[in-house]
Image: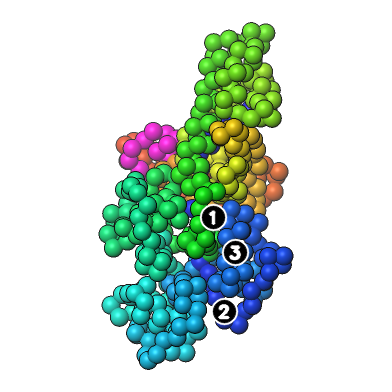
Amino acid sequence: MKKLLTLVFSLSFLFSLSITSVSAADSFPDLDKVSWAKDEILYLNEEGIVYGFPDGTFGPMEDVTRAEVAVMLIRDLYPNQTHEGDVPFDDVSKDAYYSDEVGVAYEEGIIKGYDGNMRPKDPITRAEAAAMVDRAYNIQRNGEVDGFPDAEDVPWATESILDLTSHQIIHGKPDGTFAPLEDITRAEFARVLAATIEPSFRSDHLSENEIAQKTETLQEEVFTILYDDLKEHGADSEDRDYQRIEDEMAEYVTSDFNEEVEETYYEACLSCDTLYYDNNFAWDIHMNVMENNSDKVIVETAQLQAFTYTGAFKTITLIKEDGKWKLDAIDSEVFDADRHLDLTVEQAEQRIYDQFKVTDVTYLHTYEKETQDYDGDSYTTEIHVFKNNEDGAEFEVDASTGGTDI
């Protein structure tokens, strides 16, 4: 039953000149966690643009630095060009492995620096990456494109963000923002660069915002059809008849998943909490796009701990049939001691607003607590504590599961 709850659904390279490219057959052993970017990473590796770590891994979730991005762009665009003279930034040593590429990038107008410094070792933000890619490849706007409410926060990068977005080179977040000051992971930037260099990497992918919207809409439709009928006819099990809604449901689910929905329909408990309908907060704290192409999307989000539900990761599969996206599976894996959420104080505060409908709380402190997962294994979690400024009541939020308590 929990499978039908609403589940609503985030660019860094280490470049070493002494490391040789691995073949696609060898691959990197740590790309399974970013299957949505694997092809792009291998493409860039085969082109000699990106490399892995000395231990053979790629580190897809590590940050990429400003210097590393400069090296990558120059490797692709100006592989035989060298920089003559001093490096134009005070914080870039002539002995640094990236000094030549940084100099070329400056000559070509790709990087500008900050008050005479390049900040080579700083993680690059999404806005900085968009600006550097736009300058390097001179991306021309492809028609009109919707903007992002927070792109205006970085006016020096706003136009670049729109340029790349218009070609589906870079995408916004599920909530409709761009998050321009957020750092970029190695896997995420690999997708951006590969899509810039090779347009075929653009067309087969939905943006994260599109994935979130399509998944949310499909689940909303399935839930509404299912439970509208149950509320009208399902008080007694003998009054249930799935054939009443099967044709309508077929618009939103594949034939395989339809069997599971039908089973859920007949097993639904109208007097217990199986009708619990969670809000979209799970997308804000966790979304992992595991597969994304023209015919299939697999995305993992989180179902927070609430009422009698144990928090879980939800893997949702969409398949395109006859030109229309449909739900094909919703699978669940409960949080355990080794893998769970890690809510920030800000996320925990939002959890309180969503769960208890209060409007004014103050963060007090965080403490550690020994707890057990669903299988009885012990682990340490953090508990964020807040005060309700209206009545003085204290709220506690488990950072591991999103569970709340007063």
The mark that comes first in sequence, 1 or 3, is: 3
The mark that comes first in sequence, 3 or 2, is: 2
For residue 200, which numbered disc appears in the image? 1
Residue type at mark 1: give it. Answer: Ser
Q: Nearer the viewer, residue 264 or 310?
A: 264
Identify residue for label 3.
Answer: 43
Residue 379 appears anywhere in the view: no
How far is the residue under mark 3 from the one under mark 2?
18 Å
How far is the residue under mark 2 from the one under mark 1?
28 Å
The mark that comes first in sequence, 2 or 1, is: 2
Tag 2: Cα neighbours inside 10 Å, few (<14), some, or many (≥20)? some
Residue 91 appears in which quarter of the rendering?
bottom left
Residue 178 as seen in the image, left or right of residue 228:
left
Q: Which residues are magenta?
A: 352-362
Q: Is residue 312 above or below residue 35?
A: above
Tag 3: Cα neighbours inside 10 Å, few (<14), some, or many (≥20)? some
x 46%, y 73%: residue: 77
Q: Is residue 39 above or below residue 295?
A: below
Select label 2 or label 1 by which is in front.
1
Counting from the top left corner in percent of width and height, residue 337 is at 65, 51
| Magenta region includes residue 266 | no
Quarter placement of the N terminus: top right
Residue 36 as seen in the image, left or right of residue 90:
right
Q: Secondary structure at mark 2?
A: loop
Q: Secondary structure at mark 1?
A: helix
